[in-house]
Image (cartoon, rainbow, N blue to C red):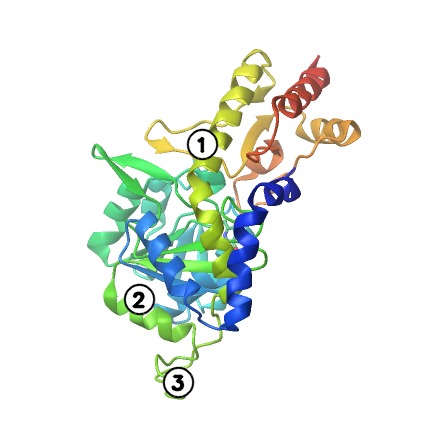
């Protein structure tokens, strides 16, 4: 499904010296690579601040904590996502309210969000699923007049863009706070756990910096109760070394996706992913809707072809997508021969 060893071979000579530099200076905690990476990711997101943290999960949990949710406060989100999206809402003291997705893009449906708003709604948490952005313009238009914050779960969508009112807007640009994951399998993956928040709200940036460091910006001075969720300097060095590759890697993923989609045009039993024309997709996943999905899965397993079902169990609703979705290998280092093997196996199953 993903060959990180193939990626390692192409970047080894850039990443290892960067790590070595951290090791030689022994600056493992909040060393200079951390603020450097924070500045780079903020720039990529068209945001003013980047705040590194320990994981993508914490990159969602800390902004939710910053909302000081009270029992009964609601956060509207999608059921078709990784568990962390809803789990963090619960752990921050809120109640996740699930609304359905758009059947073509799998992203949260703004019309359903609008219907779910109540006086208890404190935030909307869209997920830019599989690497394409949700309809941020609509979501901001719903949240803004009500003082309801939009927190973008961009764990799968670093570098994704969407044309809004004729202008390219980045993931992380419009939301109040955006969370990224650098889990190793992500388009920009660390060599361990890591995450980052971005925001353009100065006061919120200060608050998040405190929350990730036991509630104090100054050592041994604690304004509130926070936690230890620092971004490891070694991981920041790995990510900085990999960052120049992100755009070409995502372009390669788009190229692979186009190749698959052309090949699947004559197999009526599979529906290739729909790219909203406003979106530039980064194809973290290439996910088909497939007839007899479980049978196809067994067939691909027998053929030795990597695949995965994201997500087999919807957190609530979104049942159709859970029954039909199947993701195929899409990583940049895939060869034409490998792509053709995947395509032939799928063709073989439906023949
Ligand atoms: C949509 C989504 N949200 C949140 C997360 C959590 O990120 P992490 O695994 O870095 O904690 C992930 C990735 O695993 C994800 O895919």
Considering every residue shown, the one lying at the far bottom of the view is 220
The CA span between labels 2 and 1 is 31 Å
Mark 2 or 1, closer to the camera: 1
Residue 219 is labelled as 3
- 339 lies left or right of 34: right
Quarter of the picture holding the C terminus: top right
* Vertical relation: 338 (above or below) 29: above
| Residue 200 coordinates in the image, percent (x, y) | 26, 58
For label 2, the residue is 205
Q: Earlier in the sequence, mark 3 or mark 1?
A: 3
Q: How crowded is mark 2: few (under 14 residues within 10 Å), some or many (20 or more)?
A: many
| Residue 175 coordinates in the image, percent (x, y) | 30, 52
Q: How crowded is mark 1: few (under 14 residues within 10 Å), some or many (20 or more)?
A: some
* Vertical relation: 121 (above or below) 307: below
| Residue 245 coordinates in the image, percent (x, y) | 46, 42
The CA span between labels 3 and 1 is 43 Å
Q: Which of marks 2 and 1 is nearer the N terminus?
A: 2
Q: Tell me the residue at 44%/71% (across/down).
A: 30
| Residue 271 coordinates in the image, percent (x, y) | 54, 22
For label 1, the residue is 251
Q: Tell me the residue at 37%/33% (across/down).
A: 280
| Callout 2 secondary element | helix
Q: Earlier in the sequence, mark 2 or mark 3?
A: 2
Is residue 54 visible in the rendered image? The answer is: no
Quarter of the picture holding the N terminus: top right
Q: Tell me the residue at 54%/32% (across/down).
A: 286
Q: Tell me the residue at 48%/51% (across/down).
A: 241
Q: Which of 192 and 112 is in front in this view?
A: 192
Is residue 225 visible in the rendered image? The answer is: yes
| Callout 1 secondary element | helix
Mark 2 or 3, closer to the camera: 3
């Amino acid at each position: 499904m993903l060959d990180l060893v193939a990626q390692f071979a192409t970047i080894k000579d850039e990443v290892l010296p960067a790590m070595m530099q951290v090791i030689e200076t022994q600056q493992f905690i909040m060393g200079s690579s951390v603020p450097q990476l924070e500045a780079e990711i903020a720039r990529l997101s068209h945001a003013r601040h980047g705040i590194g943290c320990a994981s993508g999960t914490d990159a969602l949990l800390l902004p939710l904590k910053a909302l000081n949710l009270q029992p009964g406060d609601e956060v509207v989100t999608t059921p078709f996502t990784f568990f962390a999206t809803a789990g963090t809402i619960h752990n921050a003291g809120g109640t996740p309210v699930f609304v359905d997705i758009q059947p073509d893009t799998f992203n949260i449906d703004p019309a359903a969000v609008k219907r779910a708003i109540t006086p208890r709604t404190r935030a909307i948490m869209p997920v830019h699923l599989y690497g394409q952005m949700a309809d941020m313009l609509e979501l901001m238009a719903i949240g803004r007049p009500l003082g309801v914050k939009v927190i973008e779960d961009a764990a799968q969508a670093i570098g994704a863009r969407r044309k809004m009112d004729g202008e390219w807007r980045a993931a992380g640009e419009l939301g109040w706070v955006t969370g990224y994951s650098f889990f190793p399998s992500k388009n920009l993956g660390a060599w361990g756990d890591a995450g980052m928040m971005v925001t353009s709200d100065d006061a919120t940036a200060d608050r998040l910096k405190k929350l990730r460091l036991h509630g104090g910006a100054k050592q041994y001075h604690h304004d509130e109760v926070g936690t230890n969720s620092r971004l490891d300097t070694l991981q920041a060095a790995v990510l900085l070394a990999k960052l120049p590759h992100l755009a070409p890697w995502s372009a390669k993923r788009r190229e692979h996706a186009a190749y698959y989609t052309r090949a699947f045009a004559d197999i009526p039993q599979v529906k290739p992913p729909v790219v909203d024309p406003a979106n530039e997709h980064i194809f973290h996943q290439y996910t088909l809707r497939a007839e007899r999905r479980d049978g196809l899965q067994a067939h691909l397993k027998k053929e030795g072809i990597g695949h995965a079902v994201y997500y087999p169990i919807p957190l609530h609703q979104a049942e159709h997508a859970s029954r039909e979705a199947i993701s195929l290998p899409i990583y940049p280092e895939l060869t034409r021969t490998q792509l053709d093997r995947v395509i032939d196996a799928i063709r073989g199953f439906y023949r």
